[in-house]
Amino acid sequence: MGKRLFILLVVLMSLSLIGIIFVQSFFINNSLENEEKNFTLSVTRALSFVSRDIQDYEIRKFYGLIQPYIADNREPDSTAIRQLYIARDDDVTDETIIHRNTILEERFKVPSLFFEIDADSIDVSNFTSERSTERFNRSLDGELGIKPTKSLVEFSNLPEIDKQAYEDTFKTLLREVPIYKRVTALQVETLLRRELKSEGIDLDFEFAIYDDDLATKVLTRNFNKSNAYFGIPIFLDSNSESNYRLWVDFPHRKKFLLSSILWMILLSILFTGVIIVAYSSAIYQLIKQRQISQIKTDFINNMTHEFKTPIATINLALDAIKNPKIIADQDKVKRYLGMIKDENKRMHAQVENVLRISKLEKNELNISKERLKLHDLIADAVTHVKLIVEDRNGYVNTHFDAAKSSVLANDTHFTNVIVNILDNAIKYSDDAPKIDVYTENIGNNIILKIADQGNGMNKQVAKRVFEKFYREHTGNVHNVKGHGLGLAYVKRIVDDHQGHVSVESEKGRGSTFIIKLPLIS
């Protein structure tokens, strides 16, 4: 996959993920706004019913108080009768039609204490209406008959008119009564709770009745006007106006609204999280595969380069042996055969390194351990490289400061670990190799430090130096032989010994490899 195509795929996938998150956020926000609107509508409807019920209750209460004083079986304190007569002649039927409307007004004295006004009593009137229509035949002597030929009588006490008249009167009389004597906080709370539950809102609330901007005594203890969210007029007068307003606040309103769509939010977060994890994993795998592909390409190039030299050397040696002049010279034949054997060993060692790492990863390499002195292993490893170092006019100095050096290790593999690190120090030193080996005890561990003054490496390379096949990228220049397997092998062996290996390095100033191993008694 090309670099541009890879970047394009990452950008498109990132934009798609951002788009999904944006759509989910928009959908959740839109749902929350809808829940807010529905909540507002439900609370407003509940408050309207509460306002109506409070006023209806008050009207019924005071009507019930005066009802005994205006009952039908009670003698009125005074009466008044008003009558209206209308007569007309019907020439077709030769009849005289008389319409009569009689209104009886009964006045009752009602104690004023019901309304708390400055008067001993008030007059309440009850009106009864009687309407009659009579027909008289004029054919008898041209005079009206003594008895009507037809009569229709209707009685009514004007219930609707009475009701409206009483309501208007009560509203006027009760306007000056203190609000706390008209309704109690308990009544308001009971009505509010009932109506809110009928709207599906089971939520704690605080309320208060305000006279314009002044709080009245009808309120809950924790009510705060600045937090009030809903308000509606109560005790409307005949003109549907009022100075009183019922305010309600829901301290946990936001929590209630969120809980209504909580399942939606949790599912959105869950699915979005799954998408993000899958996306991150896919991107990581793409990057990892790209790196592995690059590393494998470098490895194949390095391996090809490494094999070219021994193969070419073997071919030249074989060609030389075929020469009749050389084949007669036994010393030269032995020399060329020795070169072929050495180069063959070299290629075999390279293949073994690859197979050894593969077995380590599959846990197929059986490593037996025994009690050994780490100082002895270090001395043995130094012996392997001492001639090479001295040939380049360098040195390997040991500083054994650890009083205890007994560890549980495999002789062959751990010696190879130290040799590999020393070999790297030699290979990556352009000048004479200068290597110092230190040991020290820290707690129940022994620390081994191998420091060189070679080329060193930057921090980015140091982080990846223990990866399989990884080598610092130098283009097609192979001035240092290897396949990036040595330090990967070092890490796997140290890990198998329950140890830890790390590196401290600075470009141009050398590197220090640090191995920590547990001591045994």
Image (tube, rainbow, N blue to C red):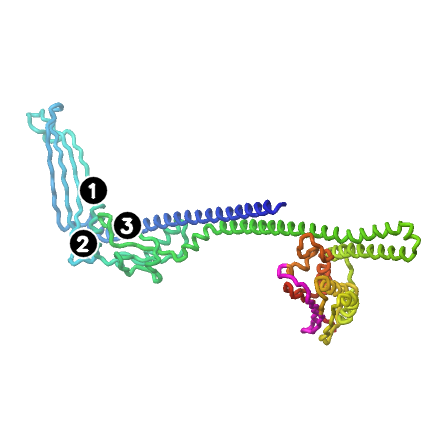
Residue furthest to the top: 92
- Who's the residue at 52% across and 47% down the image? 15
Counting residues from the N terminus, which is met first, the one under dot 2 or under dot 1?
Answer: 2
- Residue designated by label 1: 158
Disc 2 from disc 3: Cα separation? 21 Å
Secondary element under disc 2, as helix, strand or loop, is strand
Residue 56 image label = 3
Q: Is residue 64 left or right of residue 486?
A: left
Counting residues from the N terminus, which is met first, the one under dot 2 or under dot 3?
Answer: 3
Residue 402 image label = none
Q: Is residue 371 visible?
A: no
Instruction: Name the dominant secondary structure of the magenta segment.
Output: strand
Q: Is residue 234 visible?
A: yes
- Residue designated by label 2: 110
Q: Is residue 9 left or right of residue 501?
A: left
Q: Can you tell which quarter of the image residue 129 is in? A: top left
Please give the count of numbered marks on the rendered protein: 3
